């Protein structure tokens, strides 16, 4: 049977009373993926195998350290996995690049629904498939000077990506 958690108590990293509460009580722990952060309904299993359903507002972005209480009174502490990002660095791209290549790159990312964020001359791409698949697609576009790198976001750093849907 799934335990339902809808009562958000706060984050133990922001509230020392909550941190003290879990130091003195038994609690369940769940590890969520970065894509779970915005969902309104999340189904997961605790580290000990208990099914948990979290029902929350989509306005609340989950963070590691969020503490929930289930309908049966059990405490649930959340952890969010780190997120691997593909970084496209356009700093050294030739000035006379064919616009069609950039349009095609945008099409590849958008058509596959890769969430992106643009910062200065870099495009951060949230990986939703195997990193080598996306890297191969980008390399085949052959944008001279484009650097492909990877970085890991801190688990508590919520990156607001541009998303696309139909």
Image (cartoon, helix red, strand yellow):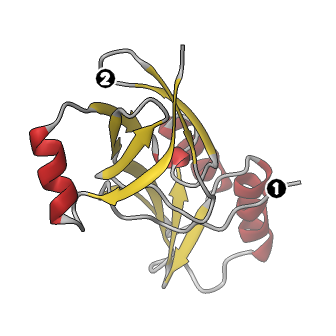
Count neighbours of disc 2 (C-alpha within 10 A) and say few if under 14, some if 14 to 19, many if 20 or more.
few
Q: Which mark is residue 47?
A: 2
Between the C-alphas of marks 2 and 1, the distance is 33 Å
Q: Mark 2 or mark 1, which is nearer to you?
A: 2
Q: What residue is rendered at 54% in x and 68% in y?
A: 160
In the image, residue 101 lies at what x, y percent?
73, 66
Q: What residue is rendered at 49% in x and 34% in y?
A: 71
Q: What residue is rendered at 37% in x and 25% in y?
A: 46
In this rendered view, identify the residue nearer to me: 99 or 55: 55
Q: Is residue 108 left or right of residue 95?
A: right
Q: Is residue 102 left or right of residue 76?
A: right
Number of residue marks: 2
In the image, residue 104 lies at what x, y percent?
77, 61
In the image, residue 1 lies at what x, y percent?
54, 13
Say above or below: 5 vs 92: above
In this rendered view, identify the residue nearer to me: 100 or 4: 4
The residue wearing badge 1 is 165
Q: Which mark is residue 65?
A: none
In this rendered view, identify the residue nearer to me: 106 or 144: 106
Q: Is residue 11 left or right of residue 7?
A: left
Q: Secondary structure at mark 2?
A: loop
**To which quarter of the image does residue 10 belong?**
bottom left
In this rendered view, identify the residue nearer to me: 76 or 160: 76
């Amino acid at each position: 049977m799934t335990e339902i958690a809808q009562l958000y108590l706060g984050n133990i990293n922001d509230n020392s009373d909550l941190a003290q509460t879990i130091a003195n009580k038994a609690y369940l722990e769940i590890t969520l993926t970065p894509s779970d952060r915005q969902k309104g309904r999340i189904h997961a299993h605790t580290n000990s195998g208990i099914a948990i359903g979290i029902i929350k507002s989509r306005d609340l972005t989950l963070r590691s350290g969020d503490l929930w209480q289930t309908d049966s009174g059990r405490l649930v502490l959340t952890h969010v996995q780190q997120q691997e990002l593909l970084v496209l660095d356009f700093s050294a791209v030739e000035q006379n690049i064919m616009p069609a290549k950039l349009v095609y790159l945008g099409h590849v990312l958008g058509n596959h629904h890769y969430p992106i964020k643009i910062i200065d001359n870099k495009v951060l791409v949230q990986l939703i498939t195997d990193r080598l698949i996306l890297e191969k697609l980008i390399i085949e576009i052959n944008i001279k000077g484009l650097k492909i790198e990877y970085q890991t976001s801190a688990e508590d750093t919520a990156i607001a990506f541009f998303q696309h849907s139909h």
